[in-house]
Image (tube, rainbow, N blue to C red):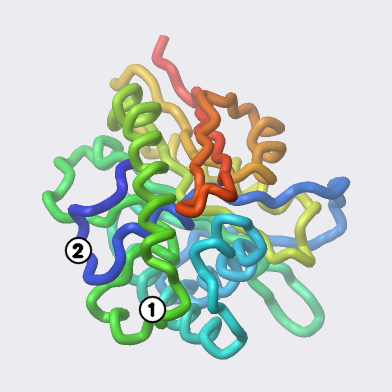
């Protein structure tokens, strides 16, 4: 998906893709001892999704590079503005998300979340001129959330660099190849203390099933696509994705490189 410069956004569209990359979750031996329920998310889940994803992404190198001044105080503000953005994104028919909820004696806790962008083709309608791009809670902020977002926590020049390079790679490797025949995984994350239980794998599989259920069988094929961070590749390889091309994005200073793996999986082909 392209960097969404066409969308209804008022703030920093360049940070959309740097945090939209599909994120990692399983690096420990899998356990199956958690009582987790996966359900389709609604606007009411926006805050829980924001908290899960912000926490899951916090230690990734490219996030630390662009978000230089995040602390406990402005983290709360980031959650607040991300919540507004997620709620707005979930109003669109071609955006859907799932939340994994852990059931405990103290109550239910959202521990993992994933969001996808369906091609408008699946909905049988023409894509509106102005629409949200690849959805994630860190994307450029809507007008309603502009004043809530701490610009001092984000180095926009660095964010622009990463976003532009990812956008070009995805346009060349995904959009130009698959067009509207792709189900794009925008973001996925699990709270660190619950990683290693195949929760993300469950969300991944549930998202594909949801997309396939709405895909017109008159069309020839459908691919699940994403751009993975390096730690997340294992999860996607285990779930049948293949690597198209690795992208290495250098920092402005030239002292760091951020690697992303653009990946695909054929999930439907007509006979």
Secondary element at tag 2:
loop
Q: Which image quadrant: the C terminus? A: top left
Which residue is at 85% across, 52% downward?
32
Considering every residue shown, the one lying at the far top of the view is 271
| Observer-nearest of 16 and 259 | 259
Question: Residue sitting at 60 percent across and 62 percent down?
Answer: 57
Which residue has dot 1 on it?
151
Viewer-nearest residue: 80 or 69: 69
Q: Residue at x 44, y 28 (%)?
A: 223
Residue 182 vs 84, above or below: the answer is above
Residue 73 position, x and y percent, is 56, 90
User: Whole-percent x and y of residue 170?
Assistant: 38, 35
Q: Please provide percent x and percent y for residue 68.
A: 54, 72
Which mark is in front, 1 or 2? 1
Q: Is residue 253 toward the left or the right of residue 147 in the image?
A: right
Q: Position of residue 244 (x, y in %)?
A: 51, 24
Q: In the rendered view, does 148 fall on the left or right side of 37?
A: left
Task: Tell me the SS state at disc 1.
Answer: helix
Residue visible at 39% across and 34% down in the picture: 169
Res. 128 in view: yes
Q: Quadrant of the N terminus?
A: top left
List the residue tagged with mark 2: 8
Callout 2 environment at 10 Å: few (<14), some (14 to 19), or many (20+)?
some
């Amino acid at each position: 998906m392209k960097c969404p410069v066409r969308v209804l956004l008022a703030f920093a569209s360049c940070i959309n893709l740097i945090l939209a990359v599909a994120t990692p979750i399983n690096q420990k031996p899998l356990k199956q001892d958690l009582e987790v329920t996966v359900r389709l998310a609604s606007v009411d889940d926006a805050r829980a999704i924001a908290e899960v994803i912000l926490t899951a992404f916090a230690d990734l190198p490219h996030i630390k590079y662009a978000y230089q001044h995040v602390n406990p105080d402005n983290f709360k503000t980031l959650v607040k503005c991300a919540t507004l953005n997620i709620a707005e994104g979930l109003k669109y028919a071609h955006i859907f998300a799932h939340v994994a909820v852990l059931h405990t004696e103290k109550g239910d806790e959202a521990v993992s979340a994933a969001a996808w962008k369906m091609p408008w083709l699946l909905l049988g309608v023409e894509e509106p001129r102005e629409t949200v791009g690849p959805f994630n809670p860190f994307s450029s902020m809507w007008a309603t959330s502009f004043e809530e977002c701490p610009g001092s926590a984000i180095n926009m020049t660095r964010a622009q660099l990463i976003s532009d390079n990812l956008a070009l790679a995805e346009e060349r490797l995904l959009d130009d190849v698959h067009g509207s025949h792709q189900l794009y995984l925008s973001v996925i994350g699990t709270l660190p203390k619950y990683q290693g239980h195949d929760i993300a794998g469950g969300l991944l599989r549930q998202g594909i099933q949801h997309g396939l259920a709405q895909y017109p069988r008159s069309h020839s094929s459908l691919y699940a696509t994403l751009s993975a961070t390096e730690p997340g590749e294992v999860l996607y390889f285990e779930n049948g994705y293949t690597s198209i091309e690795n992208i290495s994005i250098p920092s402005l200073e030239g002292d760091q490189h951020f690697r992303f793996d653009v990946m695909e999986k054929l999930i439907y082909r007509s006979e």
